[in-house]
Amino acid sequence: MLMSGGLQSPVQMIKGVGPQRAELLAKRGIHTLEDLLAYLPFRYEDRIRFSHVKDVRPNAVYTLRVSVMSGQAIRTMRGRDAIYHLLVKDETGSLPCKFFHGGYLEGRLKPGQELILHGKAEVDKQRPARIEMVNPQIEVISGAGLDSTEVGRIVPIYEAIGTFGSRAIRRAIYGGLQQLDPRMPDVLPTTLRAKLNFPSHRDAVIQTHFPPPEESLDALNQFRSPAQQRLIFEELFLYQLSLALDRRATRKENAIAFRVREDSVREALKRILPFKPTAAQKRVLAEIAADLEKAAPMNRLLQGDVGSGKTIVALQAAVIAMENGCQAALMAPTEILAVQHFLSARRNLEKAGYKVELLISGMKSTEKTAALARIASGEAQLVIGTHALIEDNVVFAKLGFVAIDEQHRFGVLQRKRLMDKAASHGHAPHVLVLTATPIPRTLSLTLYGDLDVSVIDELPPGRTPIVTSLATEQSLPGVWESLRREIAAGHQAYVVYPVIEESKLELKAAMDEFERLSKQVFPKLKLGLLHGRLSSEEKEIVMLKFRLNEIQILVTTTVVEVGVDVPNATVMVIEHAERFGLSQLHQLRGRIGRGAGKSHCILVAPGHMSENAKARLETMVRTANGFEIAETDLLLRGPGEFFGTRQSGDLGFHIANPLRDREILDMARREAFALAENPSSAGELNQILRALPPHWQRRYHLARIG
């Protein structure tokens, strides 16, 4: 709270902001003083210790305490701009400085005046023997001495927001901090702060923006000062507390306790298996079955690399539900994936007497009406679909089990709407969330900390490793020749492009390349084209032809990224591979290597590319381990993009970085879950709620406490 106006004061009321800068800040989600104070420095500079002029060397940054010798503005030919030439000195020597667009300094700096300069020293291009400073930051020392946000302290450096530069942001934040009420409430209980030896929230905010002079610069730039660690812990603690309370609330709900150990259920599970399950699949199914026996709803995340057999495990869980007289639903993010699941489920389940239904938006009206009627009557026992499953007109007779595939593509509210279809019968469904995107433990704890986690960590027997190699545009003729040999041996291939049609990005497009490859490169072979703009019916026809080997080469976009299963396809060529993310490349590569034949993935990229792109492609060549790839992806991209999928709104951490702050995350999780699960902690939970402003309650979903 502030003595005047409060933390919720409009940001434009802060000195140094005003209406124009407030508009810039609003685009970054900064509307109040509290928002501005949450805009933290990304690094710090030591401007306490002054260097001597005699020690200045090129290409290094210095803070100097000097006096003015002379200054002159020299106009350019255009007359408007001026370069201000300043000569300064200390007791060890003199140094020239140059300020472009520096006419504003004319008349302001007088000989003898004391200054603080901070900037980079460079070689004077006109006079190579001379060293100068170009556009250094400048601070005039007044008669009262040095009291500056710029020098004489450890200075915070902020990312500029449009034309609102780091220096101006620094001054605005400094002014706001002076108004913080010493009695400001603290969200962390006193006992927890004392246990962890953390400063108060108020002190942590002040010291993170303007650290005390004795603070370690290395610790600050590694986000390991006590003040920074306090704020990091706070963000992770509140988020983990919301997960812990979600989990506590879920366990209080009622679900149907399924009979799992009866002989009829065991026989039903054996009947649908198309192959002998792996040890990992057996272990995971046992974990799921143990959850399904309980009267509290299962909430479990099933992770498994591409091709590890997650879908058959989900179908086994659905069979348990169906054997207990309930319906099951499987929601997929795309129609092509939903159709793949439907065909697989029908192939495995209908011979055992189960009725499988497909529900997608692309269905004809008459087909959809009939499907809805079978779902409502209970005739449809397993319903597989897309977002169409959560439409208002979808009514289940008795939904007891829900599986959500590639769940990161769905929003929190979308998942909840599907679960509510079961809640309307007076019980919560058992929920199994599947992902073929391996999630490093750090992100798993952060994104899905309210879920129990099962991992299928082995592939079914008979799978041969995929050989991945890099190729350039110049080597494409050889790539096409190797592809012809694979087709001649009876196999099939994918050729993947990043865009559907020609764009300003100068990327090869699937539609254009399909025409060129069909006519010029593979005129005697059967090619097909698949992309996201085709209708559901058109996609289904293309995929059916590909499965039947009526299409030998499928030219496609990333629409085949998940769910497509054609064991006869042994080659994948990905053009402009440098434009794809690691996770996407891994998912694409997972479309091959699904049969006994040796498979090859060829990544076509330019010889010259960014270091980041090069690292991604080298990772793909080096390993097929999804978890290793996910860890590398996280290191290269950072966690921001993962958290961008937090669909309920605002999970953008201001200072916490779960990748960097793994130890603090573990500590925050332990403390949050201990607090939520301890029946005697109601008083501390209410204390947290009272200290949380309403918008924080919404941000961390904590309004339910108490």
Image (tube, helix red, strand yellow):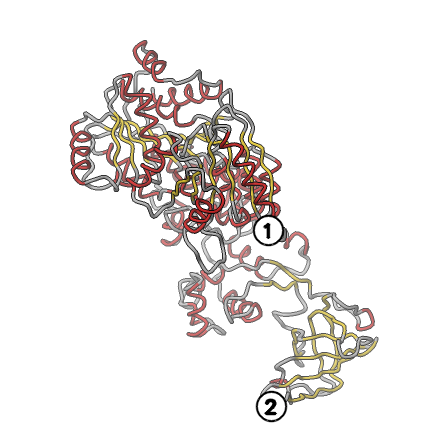
Which residue is more in the foreground, 591 or 407?
591
Which residue is more in the foreground, 308 or 117?
308
Q: Residue 692: give x, y in percent of width and height.
A: 40, 51
Q: Residue 406: give x, y in percent of width and height.
A: 40, 37
- Quadrant of the drawing holding the N terminus: bottom left
Q: Quick check: can you spot residue 323? A: yes
Q: Is residue 569 left or right of residue 355?
A: right
Q: Residue 259: give x, y in percent of width and height.
A: 30, 16
Q: Residue 640: give x, y in percent of width and height.
A: 50, 49
Q: Quick check: can you spot residue 671? A: no
Which residue is more in the foreground, 410 or 552?
552
Q: The residue tagged with tag 2: helix, strand or loop?
A: loop
Q: Earlier in the sequence, mark 1 or mark 2?
A: 2
Give the residue type that dot 1 points to.
Answer: Pro
Give the residue type that dot 2 points to.
Answer: Gly
At horizontal 32% and vertical 14% (from top left) the residue drawn is 268
Is 427 rendered above or below residue 638?
A: above
Q: The residue tagged with tag 1: helix, strand or loop?
A: loop
Kindly identify which residue carries mark 2: 79
* Residue sitting at the far front: 524
At horizontal 23% and vertical 41% (from top left) the residue drawn is 391
- Quadrant of the drawing holding the C terminus: top left
Q: Is residue 431 left or right of residue 397?
A: right
Is 275 rendered above or below residue 82?
A: above
Please say if the residues under marks 1 and 2 sit with CB atoms less than 8 Å apart: no
Nearer the viewer's eye, disc 1 or disc 2? Answer: 1
Category of crowding for the residue at label 1, using alpha-carbon neighbours closer than 10 angstroms: few (below 14), some (14–19), many (at least 20): some
Kindly identify which residue carries mark 1: 606
Is 606 rendered above or below residue 418?
A: below
